[in-house]
Amino acid sequence: MRAIVLAKRPADVALVSAAAALGETTAIAVGSEADVLAVLAGARAAGATRLVRLWDPGLETTDYLGVAYTLAAAIRAIGDPALSPTAILAGDRGRGVVGPAVAERLGIPLLGQVLSLSLADDKLVAKRRGRELVRSYAAALPALVCVVVDDSESAPAAAHASDAGEVESWTLSKVGLSAAELSYRKHFASKPAKGPTPKPRRFDDVRALATQLRAEGLVGGAPKPGAKR
Amino acid sequence: MANVLCVVELLHGRALPVSLEVLGQARRLSTELGATLYAVVALPRAPSWSDDDLVATLAAHGADKVVVATDETFEQNGGGEELRWGTHGAALAAVCDLLSPSLLLFGATPTAREVAARAAARIGAAYLHEAFVEARDGELQLFEGAGSDARTLEGELEFAVVATVPAGRYAPAVGDDEAEVEVVATSGRGADFDEVAAEAEARPRALVLVDEATRGAGEALAKALGGEVAEGKRGGARLVVSLGPPCPAGGGIERRVRLGDGDDGDYVVAGEPAALAEALARAVSAAAPKEGK
């Protein structure tokens, strides 16, 4: 079994540690040397045995799907997941869109909101945070899991870029893509703009608030199926 | 713009409030832009005539049409209420193939994250997380982020957009209209994760953040909520209620409530924090026995 971690931020060393416990781990990061070399150094320290940095000017203007196409192509270039049992780990944070898009591109099972991972009977077992329970799921590999990462908590000490060791630098052509193939996605990318300011919802009294929280399943016993409001 | 789709999440057979809020905003957009608004809900089987409360609710909250995506396998997956790509992806893909949405909206819930994101990738859409979805002068205006940190999709959108919208951002629509019902039957899951076990959450159900002045009232509220009291900024629960300290964000918190003065919650009730906490504890405790009847 092998694992591939889609690393993006320093906190993703937690993903690498989880992956290294499953099998031989490769970390892939998309970005310039200045942006991701320290992340890859952290991945090395956390147990990754192979590091790939993927960058091309064509990626500067693309959107999440262009990045996902590129990562999926890189994963195939490392070794077709359909031919070799592979667990792919991405961080579930912020927009959380690239991991699911890579799973779609590769056509493999996906599970998000994952808290922990293990292997049992050659299957990947993932604990997922549900609404009220933590549920365990098992899948044959290949599969992609989006693991909950909190960037604000227990941020690891920043690794020095010079500690990364050997890092393979790949471009789009290395993974069989061209900037022209991704260029149409620039129209789908959002641009900076001044937007609205979010305002909290104000409740007139706590009873209305309690009713809202109950309907959301956040307090009290939830209503039974078919119960009238 | 042709079709706007809102994916409705259920909790014990009823639409989540955030789903109705998103549906309400989608109603306003669809009216302004001349689009048809579909509420999409996943059920193990089509609703019967005696079982159409959900359809009536979605119609009253703005849907022109209600699409019921049925799959018998939802029965083994909590009735299909908790969204997951492995269980819901095929049904949602079938609905998207049928209706080619210009705008596909989800409530920004933890369980919708993977589904919204993968649906966007599947249809090749632009994706906006925790978005503002608005219309001005007959044009759609979509933002991700807020204020000077926001981003937008520029120009006439000639492609589909998938967006999640957080709870509390928009008000539900209210009406007494009826909606057509369309059933899209799907079956047969591909390779997927299978549920093998379930266990209780280790983290507290709620966290009440207090200071010296509100500790007593906070402890009573925490007891009513089945949670814990903490001083200062701390996450680690689905629900965080602050009686004084700043409301934290991230860390798996689904809803932040501010009792008292301040704007740093998703929900706010103005007033004296300790008195509000005592009243909320009473409201929560008073409602609990009725639900068991």
Image (cartoon, coloured by chain):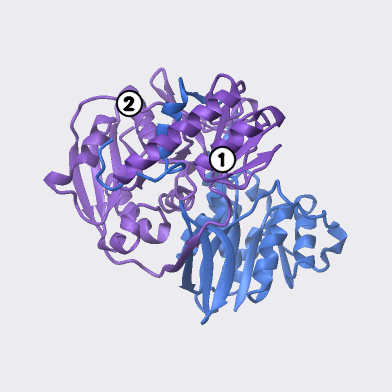
Amino acid type at image mark 1: Ala
Q: Is residue B159 left or right of residue B274?
A: left
Q: Quadrant of the C terminus of chain B?
A: top left
Look at discs 2 and 1 and give the one toward the viewer: 1
**Chain A: colour as depicted:** blue
Q: Residue A201's spot in the image, x, y percent?
A: 49, 25
Q: Front-most of A22 and B216?
A: B216
Q: Which chain is purple?
A: B
Count numbered badges in the picture. Answer: 2
Closer to us: B73 or B221: B221
Q: Position of residue B204 (x, y in %)?
A: 57, 49
Q: Which residue is mark 1?
A: B222
Please, which residue is most extreme toward the bottom here? A121
Of all chains, the one bearing label 1 is B
Q: Quadrant of residue A26?
A: bottom right
The residue beneath circle 2 is: B173
Residue found farthest to the left? B49
Query: What is the secondary structure assignment of the residue under circle 2?
Result: loop
At x 86% / y 57%, what residue is drawn? A160
